[in-house]
Image (spheres, rainbow, N blue to C red):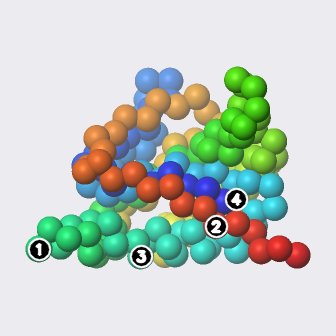
């Protein structure tokens, strides 16, 4: 699984002009399931996100996690993170999970986030929807993350 994580002052997702999810200070997670991914990769990625120390402490050092600061999580599906741009001018998305599997893993990721991070708001977009994502990146801090499936 891949995630593009952004530390934000605020973020929201709109679908057809209606707000689907919104947070204040916290993390925007753009999430992509790839072929071969399972709940195991989703669990590892979520655990890493919740513990990642990218918020400032009293000394101004990135030493606190989203859990430590009580920030929100806005989780948005984004299959385009699987883009392969190595040849030609049109990206290939063959590494993205099939839509039914991508939806299942996205829903699982959101469910686990809500179960493991009850202290903070967990908001979402809508899988497969045409979404407009609005954010104020804090820092800016943007971190790409990937948990690859274990080789069989």
Q: Nearer the viewer, mark 4 or mark 1?
A: 1
Q: Which residue is mark 4?
A: 105
Which picture quadrant has residue 90?
Answer: top right
Image x and y of residue 69, in percent: 25, 70
Please tell me which residue lies in front, 90 or 58: 90
> Which of the two labelled residues, at mark 2 and mark 1, occupies the earlier sequence position?
1
Q: Are the residues at dot 2 and dot 1 in contact (C-beta closer than 8 Å)?
A: no
> Which of the two labelled residues, at mark 4 and mark 3, occupies the earlier sequence position?
3
Residues at marks 4 and 3, CA–CA distance in whole angstroms: 21 Å
Image x and y of residue 107, in percent: 64, 57
> Which of the two labelled residues, at mark 1 and mark 3, occupies the earlier sequence position?
3
Q: Which residue is mark 2?
A: 147
Which label is found at residue 58? 1
Residue at (69%, 54%) from the top-left corner? 33
**In the rendered image of this protein, does residue 45 appear above or below residue 106?**
below
Residue at (14%, 68%) from the top-left corner? 60
Residue 116, can we see it? Answer: yes
Q: Residue furthest right?
A: 152
Q: Are the residues at dot 4 and dot 1 in contact (C-beta closer than 8 Å)?
A: no
Element marked by disc 4: helix
> Which of the two labelled residues, at mark 4 and mark 1, occupies the earlier sequence position?
1
Q: Which residue is mark 3?
A: 51
Residues at marks 4 and 2, CA–CA distance in whole angstroms: 13 Å
Q: Are the residues at dot 2 and dot 3 in contact (C-beta closer than 8 Å)?
A: no
Element marked by disc 3: helix
Element marked by disc 2: loop
Image x and y of residue 63, in percent: 26, 75
């Amino acid at each position: 699984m891949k995630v593009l994580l952004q530390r934000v002052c605020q973020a929201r997702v709109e679908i057809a002009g209606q707000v689907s999810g919104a947070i204040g200070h916290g993390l925007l997670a753009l999430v992509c399931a790839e072929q071969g991914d399972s709940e195991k990769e989703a669990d590892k990625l979520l655990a890493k996100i919740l513990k990642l120390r990218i918020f400032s402490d009293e000394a101004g050092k990135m030493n606190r996690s989203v859990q430590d600061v009580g920030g929100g999580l806005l989780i948005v599906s984004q299959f385009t993170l699987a883009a392969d741009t190595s040849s030609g001018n049109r990206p290939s998305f063959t590494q993205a999970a099939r839509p039914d599997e991508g939806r299942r893993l996205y829903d699982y990721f959101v469910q686990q986030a809500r179960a493991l991070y009850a202290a903070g708001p967990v908001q979402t977009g809508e899988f497969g929807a045409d979404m407009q994502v609005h954010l104020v990146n804090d820092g800016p801090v943007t971190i790409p993350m990937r948990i690859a499936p274990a080789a069989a």
